[in-house]
Each structure stands twice: as structure tokens, then as C-alpha cells.
Amino acid sequence: MTTARAVVVIIGLAALVGVGFGGRAAWRKWEARSKSASSTQDSVRGYLKKHASPKDFKSGYDFNLRAGVSSMQTNAARLRDEAITLRTNLAQAQKELGALLKESTDAGERQRVAKRVTATVAELLADREKRLSVRALELGTAKSNLTTITTNVAVLQDTVTQLETHSTTASNEFALAQTALNNETALNNQTARATARGAAAVKQQEFASIDRRLSTARQSLAIAQKRFETLNNGSALAETNLFLVQTNVTALRAEALEKQDALVKITEQATARQAALAAKQSQVRSLRGTLTESEDAATKARRDLVSKEQSLANQHAAFAREIRTNITAAPSYEAIYTWIGRALWTSDRLLENDDLPDQRSGAMLAEDAANYAIQNAENPWLAARICEGWVWSNLEKYDAPGKPKVALNQVLQTCANAFTRAGETNNLVKNFQLRLQHAPNPRAADGVRYYLANLLEQSGSNSEALELYRTIQDTNLLGYAQRRIAVVEKRIQKP
């Protein structure tokens, strides 16, 4: 590399000696020609393709990594939101499950109470129906006995009536017989008196017999009538008891039906609550399983995302380190050009990306390539062309918007070094103008003005230099600027 550099230097000196001061003016005019960034890039690519070995500039840089990270971030956020939604749904389902469990327990208790009440009413109804059968049987017996006693009373009544009639007849006959006896007594006929006494005695006996039978019949009738009264009262009471039991049984049957209907409804409600509880329990189990799967997926997505984000965060540094390592260890200029070409090839694709961080990485790789062209390839011309083609056209990408232009000023310093070594004064002037345009503060701007004015002064542009010296206000440079103003004014006034 030392020999090549010596050749370049010798050629440069020869050219300077050969063309003299007139040659310098021509060279400056040539340098000031209008060139587009794309044409400059094409010339660099052609130069590298010609001098590099190997000539394959493709790199292993993962240009889809940032999009992949973005996609993974979206997916991780989606999974996180899904897990949050599932946790919310699970909490709601568990709350609903608690309410259903209480409702199911309450419904089960109401069902148990309703069963007990229904069973109690059914038992009471069965008892009353048995009692009703007994009362009905009692009433039937009472009515049967009443019918029998009624018949007996009637028979006895007829017997008493007949006996009373017979008694009257017998009494009359006895009276007649007694009268006849009395009449016969007045007679002296013993036979007639004996016959009359006999007839009277017979009638008296008949009357006494009938009277005894009548007395007995009357006693039996009285007993029968009393029995009738007792049985009649008993029958009325039996009817009343039967009616009361029938009324009670009717009410109990209605109540039993009502309780049974209520039990059916309560059982349906309890069954519905149990079914709803079972469904909700199934839903809670399903949600728990789904939540576990979702949280596992979200955890894995976050872990993969962190790994991918780490890869993305390190990708530029790792690739820049790979370029630097290979250029440092390159065995030839050709190999250095290959790695510079790979840096620029990668830079082109990153600059085409819509993501600002990728664009910034691409711009930084271009500045690295310019540095390698100066320091390792010892090719100021190549470095200057890289600054023209890549760096200048992407100045807004080196620093984040609204941030101090720290990286940008460093990059422009790299380009200043390239243009200085290449002897390209016009580009150096333009580079100073860009530094002035992007100065981070007034003091830095005055520093750039001073050095730019000095450069213009050396290149013979005294009027432009004088104008810049006069705009300097920084106290640290004001004295130097005023001395240079005096010198340049004299130089301009000198015929």
C-alpha cells in the first residue's frame, strides 16, 4: 500500500509541476462541475467492481429484521391484549359462576323445602282420606241402624195400637161380662151365676193379659223411640263429621295439587339453575385453559420479541464490526474494496427502507465506508466520491429529528478530511457550507465561518472570505477575525 500511495503522490506532484498555476484553475473548474448523487454512486460502484476481489458485494444483513420485529411486536401486543381480554372474561365468568352457584343452592333449598311441604300435605291428605272412609262407614252404619230402629218403632207402634184396641175391646167385654155377672147375681139361678162368673173371669184374664202385653209393648216402644233418637242424633253427627272431613279433604286435595304444581315449577327452576351452573363451570374451565394457553403464547412471544429486538439492536453494530474486522485483516487493497462495496451495497438497501432507524444505519455505513477508503484503502478520491454520492444526500438521517447535530458534524468532518486529502477545494468549501448550515449552535457556526473564510481566502475568494469574517461574533474568534479582515481588505484594495 505504501508503494501505491507513493505512486499516487508522485503522479500528483508531476501533474502540479506540469500544469502550474493555470492547471490548478482548470482542476478547480473540473471539480466544480455539476454531478448528481446517482451518477457519482454509479462511478463508485463501477470503480469498486473493477478493483475489488472478490466482486460479490452482497452481505448477510437481515433487511427484514426490523419488519419482523415490528410484526412480532404487533403479535405480542395482540397476544397480550387477548390475554387481558381473557382474564377480564374469566373474572366476569367467575363472578357469574358465583352468582349461579348461589342461585343453584337457593333453588335446591327451595326444592327441598317444597318436597317436604308436599310430602307433609300428601301424608295429611292420606290420613284425612282414611278418616273420610271411616266417617263414611260410620254414617252408613248409623243410617242402617236408624232405618232398622225406625222399622222397629213402626212395628212396635202398630203393636201398641193393636194392643190398645184389643185392650179396649177386652175391657169392654170384661165390663159386659161383669154386668152380666151382676145381673146374674140378682137371679137365683146358680148355674147362670156360675156361668157369668166364669165368663167374667175369662174376660178379666184376657184383659189382664192384653194389658200386660200392652205395657210391655209400650215399654219396648219407649226404648225403641229412645234408641231411635240416639241413633238419629248419631246419624246427624256422623253426617256433620263426614261433611267436615269431606271439606277438609277437598281443601287438602287442592292444597296438595297446588304444592305439587309449585314443586314441579321449583324443580324446573332448580334443574335450569343446575344446567346453567354446569354450563358456566364448563365455560370457566374452558376460559382457564384458553387463558393458560394465551398467557404461555404471550410469554413466548415476549421472550422471542426480546431476543429479536436484541438482535435488531445489535445488528448494525455487529455488521459494522464485521466490516471493520475484515477490512483490518484484509490481505490486499482488492479485498478492502470488496468490503467497502459490501458496506455500500448494504447501505443502499437500508436507505431505501421506510424505517428511519434503518435509514440512519445505512447512512452510518456509508460514512464508515468513506473512513475505510481514507484510512485503509488510502484512496481519498474514493472517500470523496462516497461523501458526494451517499453522505451529502443523506445528511438529515445521521441525527434524530430535534436532537443536537453531533453525529452529522462528525460525518461532515470525515468528508472534510476526504476532500482535503483529495485536494478538492470546491467540495471542501461546499462541505464547510453544509457544516455551517447544520451547525448545532451560534458558537459552532462562528467556528465554521472562520475556517471557511480562511479556506476561501487561501483559494483567492477574498470577497466571500471578507463577508464571512465580518459575520463572526464569538468573542474567542473576534480578534482573529478582525485581524484577517484588515489583511483581506488591504489585499482587495491593492491594485
Image (spheres, rainbow, N blue to C red):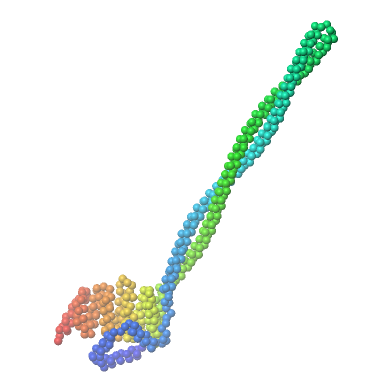
363 w.r.t. 74: above or below = below
Quadrant where the image shows the C terminus: bottom left
Residue 309 position by quadrant: bottom left
240 w.r.t. 5: above or below = above
Residue 423 position by quadrant: bottom left
Q: Nearer the viewer, residue 263 or 449?
A: 263
Expressed as whole percent of the image width and height from the top left, the position of residue 27 reads 27, 88
Q: Count the marks.
A: 0
> Can residue 407 be seen from the camera position used here?
no
What residue lies at 18% left-to-right and 82% top-to-bottom?
488
What residue lies at 58% left-to-right and 46% top-to-bottom?
260
What residue lies at 30% left-to-right and 79% top-to-bottom?
412
The residue at the far right in this view is: 191
Q: Nearer the viewer, residue 386 or 94?
A: 94
What residue lies at 26% left-to-right and 75% top-to-bottom?
444
Q: Is residue 462 left or right of residue 357?
A: left
Expressed as whole percent of the image width and height from the top left, the position of residue 120 reads 60, 42
Expressed as whole percent of the image width and height from the top left, the position of residue 479 reads 19, 77
> Can residue 449 be seen from the camera position used here?
yes
178 w.r.t. 405: above or below = above
26 w.r.t. 363: above or below = below
Q: Nearer the viewer, residue 476 or 410?
A: 410
Expressed as whole percent of the image width and height from the top left, the position of residue 276 reads 53, 55
Quadrant where the image shows the N terminus: bottom left
Q: Is residue 466 left or right of residue 45?
A: left
Q: Is residue 14 left or right of residue 103?
A: left
